[in-house]
Amino acid sequence: MAVDRDISRAVMEEEIALLRGLAATYKWGVIPDLAELRLIVTMYSYTNDPFILEVMCDDYKEKPPLFEFVDPYTGERGTVRAYPRGHDSLFHSSGPCICAPFNRKAYKAEFTTGPHADWRAGDWMASQANKYDWSNHTKLCDMLGLIQTRLSRPDLYKGRMT
Amino acid sequence: MNSIDQNLEVTVNSTRGTQQFSFPKQTKVEDVIRQAVTAFGFATGDDFQLVMESNTADPLQPERPLVSYHIADGAVLILTSIGSGV
């Protein structure tokens, strides 16, 4: 059942308000488009590589948001060059995508490139995938904070995906 | 010396807001993390780390006391989590 867009919009507004502290620390650009249920966030890695994240929040939070990186040099969405490469599979080459329960693109049932046929989008907030408690990553600020941490640390960030 | 001088007043920033804390200078980083996780209402099973706002690349070592990092009153620390590859 689809979530009323006004409800998703209200949740977005509430969670975007929590971003302020970290946005200032990490010099994020935060550009909400509430009419379209879209949030754009610009970030930098510790090496000063720029990244653009597009977060679509239709049907949020019945379903997780849809995260997509946008190439900062060409504007192309979802290319491997738009994505960071990490020390593990969170930034996944299938899609590519952010492979986490909080990303709709990781679900095979939602996207044919989704790495996980074993996940159901409706269960995302209670996920224990990989024996990890994902309940601390159920707000937009949690998700963006996790992604920024992956970009900020030399032991976790390995450049662009290609 | 007043006992209050033995404490550090720090700000901890997290994905769920910002709070002020007062800790004895010898408090270990792992104890700061534990208190902050509780204060922000995070589930405790996660692997959290603290970084200084001035250096987000290097997590503070959990076994070290705050004073060993020369953290001063008013310092801003960030509570972070790296999630898991799935």
Image (spheres, rainbow, N blue to C red):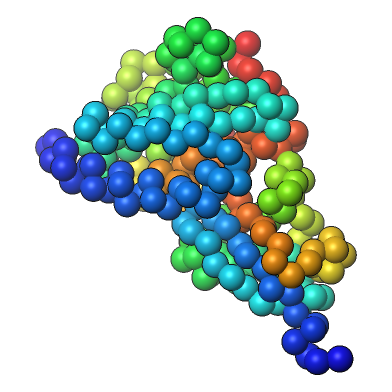
A133 or B71, which lies in front? B71
A99 or A128, which lies in front? A99
Residue A137 position within the rendered picture, expressed as x and y whole percent measured from the top left: 45, 47
Residue at horizontal 53 percent and vertical 16 percent from the top = A72
Residue B18 position within the rendered picture, expressed as x and y whole percent measured from the top left: 53, 62
Q: Is residue B10 above or below residue A141?
A: below
Q: In this view, does A151 lie above or below A133?
A: above
Quarter location, residue B32 = bottom right
Q: Is residue A34 above or below residue B23?
A: above
Q: Is residue A8 above or below residue B68?
A: above
Residue A129 position within the rendered picture, expressed as x and y whole percent measured from the top left: 46, 42
Residue at horizontal 47 percent and vertical 22 percent from the top = A69
Quarter location, residue B23 = bottom right
Residue A125 position within the rendered picture, expressed as x and y whole percent measured from the top left: 35, 48
Residue at horizontal 55 percent and vertical 10 percent from the top = A73
Residue at horizontal 39 percent and vertical 16 percent from the top = A113
Confirm whether residue B70 shows in the render: yes
Quarter location, residue A88 = top right
In the rendered structure, the answer to whether residue B45 lies left or right of residue A46 reads left
